Amino acid sequence: MVKKRVIPCLDVAGGRVVKGVRFEQLRDVGDPIELATRYSELAADELVFLDITATLEDRGPTLELVERAAEELSIPFTVGGGVSGLEDARALLRAGADKVAVNRAAFEDPAMLTALADEFGAQAVVCAVDARGGEVVTHAGRNPRGRHAVDWAQEAVARGAGEILLTSIDADGTRAGYDLALTASVSDAVSVPVIASGGAGEAKHLADAFAVGAEAALVASIVHERPERLRELKAELREAGWPVRS
Amino acid sequence: MRVVIADYGGGNLRSVSSALARAGCEPVVSIDGVEVREAALAVIAGVGHVESAARGLAAQGLDEAIVDRAAAGRPVLGICVGMQLLCGESEEGGRGLGLLDAPVRRLRSRRVPHMGWNTLRPTRPSVLLDGLEDDDVYFAHSYAVDPAAADVTVAQVEHDGVVVAAVESGPLAGVQFHPERSGVAGARLLANVVRWSRSV
């Protein structure tokens, strides 16, 4: 049986890992490669690097970080933030990213997902869906788009996305638990794996997300504060009976 | 040991190259047919659609180089799509090099792609799997070798049914998972591949 995944997410701004609450109040939590290597040693199943200022600053993610990560890491990693089309995605995959996460660009041009999947395979295409009150939002939560997240996730998968990274902006950084209703409805509506994101505070929150259908759970602030927490979270999940890699 | 990674334009060769270097090899990424034909070990790796990968290989003449070296008994490792390229007809559309008599089918599991860490179950002894019984390795794929190809299968995993995880036949080895992204277990697999390639 495929294991449930625990995935530290590194929000990167200006070459540093940052963390905020509801995408605001950013503070510096470290060097991306140093943190990534540490998480890899602590049995992270995958990593996600999100360049959270790339779309706002209208530029693509930095390739140098991806190249370093590819050489240093021996676990898979996804890169997102500012991926605007095939050329960006190709450059990231060539630089060593295992998957690319696309958000706004895919929402505005869903055919892009098909082009990506045709060229790189669906397994390399992650559609990031940010939602507030169930509605899709883009530009780091600033722009509401007037469409339900379930509806968009279904189309994204039909178009070629191989995974949905579902972030609840309401829950992000609160440590009060994932948005389980949203996670459940998206997981039920699509056949690809769903990664729950936003709100992790304790092992029970991850277990709750798995119980409603998520294949993976993103964690950020709780592990950035004390990376060893990652190993503890996974041990607690195993004790609770979840298939989690040690 | 000099290992050539066939560059068909599909990406993600940097991680494979780094992992092979960590395993003590001298990896080189190449589009040169002679190099791909003659190296001590050739690796076909990467992500992508099997058809675009096959087209990419053919565009550089690397398909013939791989077929020639296999016919001469020189070892080839296929990783993920590279493993599917060693096979014949694929349900994804298109076909591989037909070196392994095994069709490639879409997974019938509830969640596809099969994405994440899964536990290897060896089905017959192979040097490729030394020390890897019950280890977790990383998968990311929607298509796989048909489980009916039991004669070449050396390991499988469970994902709503059997998924072929590794094959070995003469000078050909294939892994559906990503050793370059499977931590310590992946490093061991690559070290085993190096040993295997010397014994082929």
Image: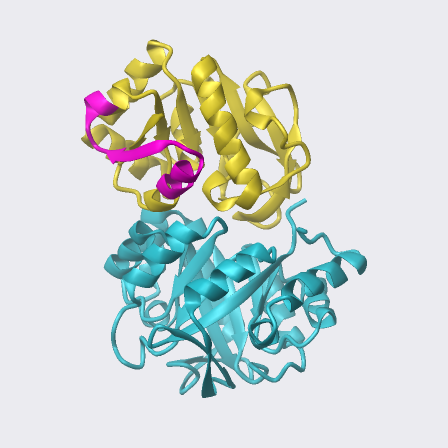
Chain colours: A cyan, B yellow
The verdict on residue B33 being magenta is yes
How far from the left and from the top, in percent, is residue B120?
63, 35
- From this viewpoint, is residue B188 visible? yes
| Residue A159: quarter of image | bottom left
| Residue A205: quarter of image | bottom right
All told, the count of numbered labels is: 0
Q: Is residue A36 left or right of residue A246?
A: left
Q: Is residue B35 left or right of residue B43?
A: left
How far from the left and from the top, in percent, is residue A213?
66, 62
Quadrant of the image containing the N terminus of chain A: top right
A84 lies above or below A44: below
Query: In front here: B47 or B134?
Result: B134
Query: In front here: A42 or A80?
Result: A42
**Going 38% across and 11% down the picture, which residue do you hit?**
B73
Can you name the residue that lies furthest to the bottom here?
A25
Query: In front here: A61 or A180?
Result: A61
Query: In front here: A40 or B63?
Result: A40
**Going 66% across and 68% down the picture, which residue do you hit?**
A229
A115 lies above or below B192: below
| Residue A127: quarter of image | bottom left
How far from the left and from the top, in percent, is residue A151?
50, 70
| Magenta region | B16-35
A242 lies above or below A169: above
- From this viewpoint, is residue B92 visible? no
The verdict on residue B21 being magenta is yes
Can you name the residue that lies furthest to the front here?
B24
Q: Is residue A49 left or right of residue A56?
A: right
How far from the left and from the top, in percent, is residue B161?
66, 37
**Going 59% across and 82% down the picture, which residue do you hit?**
A171
